[in-house]
Image: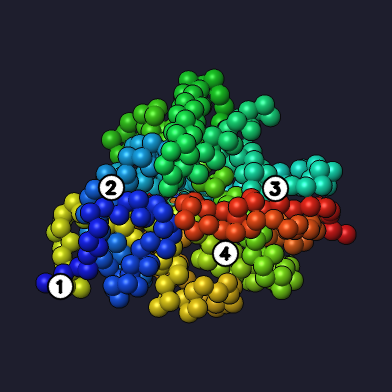
């Protein structure tokens, strides 16, 4: 049996938090291996990177998600009892509920609501002169996804809800005040979402058929029971929160258009080019660094032993930047996706494997649609200037963004 290369440090949690996204990739380079072991949160943890590793990691016969996510992440980002931590039939049943919301027509509807929000806000942008994209897009996405999900949202509460959702997203890899803001955001959001579910159930709120709120409120698990209120709340937020998180990818798309101006022309009115561009934004820019699972029962892989219960991290960012998969991975080159046939284990910003059978992100089609819509508005509907500002993307911060949030000035409509 081969020995997994092992980091000798007694615990690497702080180093991970200080190094950020490159943590696993740097060690893979150091050990000349796509697998190594370290200690994180005082537990031995196997870290993996690359296509073969992704294929292994998304094999649900070999890994489970129960107790894989650290408690800190559950208290902020994901909540407890949601689809992310389920296995086997329970996961399959819950995941089917999410995927039933993702019909092509439903994805289009959300895309249109987002475009409509943006159109409605344009006069204010033109008047304001200066706009910071990240908070603006997040606010538009909150309104769009709530309308889509059947969730009533008054003008008076929209900003508060957006701030709480943003706090949860921003707390993902944080310690200190950012973590506490995330916890508070989750507490308030779960209470809001739980009330909505209860009101649908007692008939005091009408949620249209096929909307996320209605489907989640009425969902019955394998035993025929409705979801307990706290879990229904977590699942409703599992639709709303990550849709608002797409604002980060929209900002990265704006940054890419700024850094690679030739693409402003190439994407205009060209769906293939827009698709390539959006895929490259998802590959190139950092969002979730890793995904976590635990070994279901002992097994061996490529001569390495994986003991039952061991926590395993798949390096999502590192796999998307793996030179074995992506030649010149540090170059932004959307052309690499021309004629790309898709590979569920190579491009993994939102996880890998199958959407229905495994833990791959339920919202991948929504994400791509919203990003395409954003690219179309940024290149076809408006013109703007990008003044000098700090656009640096700090890879030590998880999740990260251009420091300025991407400020644009002198926004005007085209034509
Ligand atoms: C910024 C865009 C997004 C990113 C970067 C993202 C990323 C991810 C990642 C990394 C996972 C975990 C994969 C794993 O467990 O290995 C995930 C799961 C999930 N995502 Fe997303 N996501 C995004 C947007 C969305 C949207 C728009 C929705 C829904 C509307 C969504 C719903 C979910 C759900 C329900 C899961 C849990 C799936 C499961 O455990 O089976 N995500 N996402």
Q: Residue furthest front?
A: 9
Q: Residue at the location (22% across, 68% down)?
A: 5
Residue under label 4, please give it: 281
Crowding at dot 1, Cα within 10 Å, few <14 / some 14-19 / many 20+, comes out as few
Q: Residue at the location (31% across, 57% down)?
A: 313
Q: Quadrant of residue 28?
A: bottom left
Which of 46/158 is in front?
Answer: 46
Q: How many marks?
A: 4
Q: Residue at the location (22% across, 64% down)?
A: 6
Using the numbered discs, state the Cα–Cα distance from disc 4 to disc 1 in whole angstroms. 37 Å
Using the numbered discs, state the Cα–Cα distance from disc 3 to disc 2 in whole angstroms. 36 Å
User: Which of the image's four quarters has the C terminus?
Assistant: bottom right
Q: Nearer the viewer, mark 1 or mark 2?
A: 2
Q: Position of residue 70 (x, y in %)?
A: 32, 44
Q: Which mark is residue 41?
A: 2
Residue under label 1, please give it: 2
Q: Are marks 4 and 2 in contact (CB under 8 Å)?
A: no
Using the numbered discs, state the Cα–Cα distance from disc 1 to disc 3 in whole angstroms. 52 Å
Q: Position of residue 166 (x, y in %)?
A: 55, 40
Q: Position of residue 120 (x, y in %)?
A: 77, 43
């Amino acid at each position: 049996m081969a020995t997994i290369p092992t980091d000798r440090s007694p615990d690497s949690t702080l180093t991970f938090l200080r190094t950020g996204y490159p943590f696993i990739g740097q060690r893979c380079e150091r050990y000349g291996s796509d697998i190594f072991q370290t200690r994180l949160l005082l537990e031995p943890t196997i870290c993996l990177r690359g296509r073969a590793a992704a294929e292994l990691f998304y094999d649900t016969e070999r890994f489970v998600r129960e107790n894989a996510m650290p408690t800190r992440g559950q208290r902020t980002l994901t909540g407890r009892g949601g689809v992310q931590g389920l296995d086997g039939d329970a996961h399959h049943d819950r995941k089917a509920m999410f995927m039933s919301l993702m019909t092509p027509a439903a994805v289009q509807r959300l895309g249109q609501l987002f475009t409509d929000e943006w159109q409605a806000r344009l006069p204010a942008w033109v008047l304001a002169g200066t706009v910071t994209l990240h908070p603006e897009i997040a606010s538009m996405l909150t309104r769009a996804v709530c309308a889509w999900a059947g969730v009533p949202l008054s003008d008076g509460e929209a900003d508060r809800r957006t701030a709480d959702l943003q706090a949860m997203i921003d707390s993902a890899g944080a310690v200190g005040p950012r973590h506490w803001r995330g916890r508070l955001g989750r507490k308030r959001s779960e209470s809001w979402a739980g009330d909505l579910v209860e009101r649908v159930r007692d008939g005091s709120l009408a949620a249209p058929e096929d909307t996320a709120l209605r489907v989640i409120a009425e969902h019955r698990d394998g035993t025929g029971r409705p979801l307990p209120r706290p879990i229904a709340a977590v699942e409703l937020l599992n639709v709303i929160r990550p849709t608002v998180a797409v604002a980060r990818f929209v900002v990265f798309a704006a940054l890419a258009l700024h850094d690679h101006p030739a693409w402003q022309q190439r994407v205009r009115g060209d769906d293939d080019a827009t698709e390539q561009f959006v895929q490259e934004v998802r590959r190139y820019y950092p969002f979730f660094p890793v995904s976590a699972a635990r070994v279901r029962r002992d097994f061996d892989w490529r001569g390495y032993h994986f003991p039952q219960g061991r926590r395993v991290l798949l390096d999502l960012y590192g796999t998307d930047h793996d030179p074995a998969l992506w030649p010149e991975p540090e170059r932004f080159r959307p052309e690499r996706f021309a004629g790309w046939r898709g590979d569920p284990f190579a491009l993994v910003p939102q996880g890998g494997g199958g959407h229905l059978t495994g833990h791959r992100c339920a919202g991948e089609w929504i994400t791509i649609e919203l990003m395409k819509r954003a690219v179309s508005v940024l290149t076809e509907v408006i013109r703007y200037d990008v003044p000098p500002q700090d656009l640096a993307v700090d890879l030590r911060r998880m999740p990260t963004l251009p420091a300025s949030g991407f400020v644009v000035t002198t926004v005007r409509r085209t034509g």
